[in-house]
């Protein structure tokens, strides 16, 4: 995604598409060389997003596990329970649409001081259903003082990474 200098961008993923009555699962505002997202909560995360440069934006929505993650340039920006929607109040577990919208800069999460010309570019868009990898085998968790030692045998083929969660929150990634 490329947002030209002095321009602003916005896109969202809709859990349920129904015109003005659609249910938002995720939304992103790009301005002031930053990106801010509503993902499970208002203004859930933000990071640098220099305008005038191409950026990789990747969304993974796992409907089987009710979990979503947004990556910017290969770095995790936010992970959350997908059904909670943009603001954490939703209950819809589906993905209907992507909305590339010409946002006018109003109602931004922080003051917009870096231009308000609408426009951005999207290239190499891929929307695909993938099969989840097999779960790890021989999972054990052993209490060791104030720590919990976790071990497992990776399945074949082995995933490229794991996320360890407690009560719906990511504790660490491997």
Image: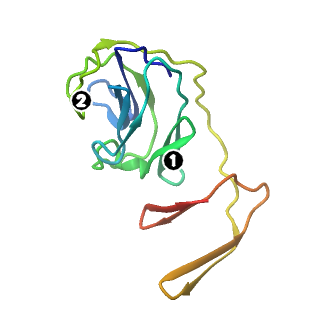
Callout 2: few (<14), some (14-19), or many (20+) C-alpha neighbours within 10 Å? some
* Residue at disc 1, secondary structure: loop
> Is 131 situated left or right of 36 in this image?
right
Residue 107 in picture, x, y percent from top left? 20, 28
Residue 83 in picture, x, y percent from top left? 39, 48
Counting labels gives 2
Residue position marked by numbered label 1 in the rendering: 63
The colour scheme applied to this rendered structure is rainbow
Quadrant housing residue 96: top left
Residue 165 in picture, x, y percent from top left? 49, 64
* Residue at disc 2, secondary structure: loop
Q: Nearer the viewer, residue 138 or 45?
A: 45
Residue located at (75% from left, 56% from top): 158
Quadrant housing residue 111: top left
Tell me: residue 63, above or below residue 18. below
Residue located at (37% from left, 26% from top): 33
Give how far apart the Cα atoms at labels 2 and 1 are: 29 Å
Residue located at (48% from left, 46% from top): 68
> Is 137 situated left or right of 147 in this image?
right
Residue position marked by numbered label 2 in the rendering: 108
**Which of pointers 2 and 1 lies earlier in the amino acid sequence?**
1
Callout 1: few (<14), some (14-19), or many (20+) C-alpha neighbours within 10 Å? some
Q: Nearer the viewer, residue 109 or 66?
A: 109
């Amino acid at each position: 995604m490329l947002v030209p200098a002095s321009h602003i961008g916005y896109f969202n993923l809709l859990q349920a598409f129904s015109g003005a009555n659609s249910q938002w699962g995720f939304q992103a505002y790009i301005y002031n060389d930053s990106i801010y997202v509503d993902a499970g909560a208002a203004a859930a995360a933000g990071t640098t997003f220099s305008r005038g440069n191409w950026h990789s934006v990747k969304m993974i929505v796992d409907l089987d596990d009710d979990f979503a993650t947004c990556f910017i340039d290969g770095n995790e920006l936010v992970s959350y329970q997908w059904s909670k929607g943009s603001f954490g109040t939703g209950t819809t577990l589906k993905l209907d649409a992507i909305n590339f919208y010409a946002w006018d800069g109003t109602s931004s999460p922080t003051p917009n001081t870096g231009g308000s010309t609408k426009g951005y570019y999207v290239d190499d868009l891929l929307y695909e259903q993938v099969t989840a990898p097999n779960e790890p085998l021989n999972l054990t968790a052993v209490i060791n003082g104030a720590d919990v030692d976790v071990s497992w045998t990776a399945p074949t083929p082995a995933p490229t990474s794991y996320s360890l969660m407690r009560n719906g929150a990511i504790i660490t990634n491997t």
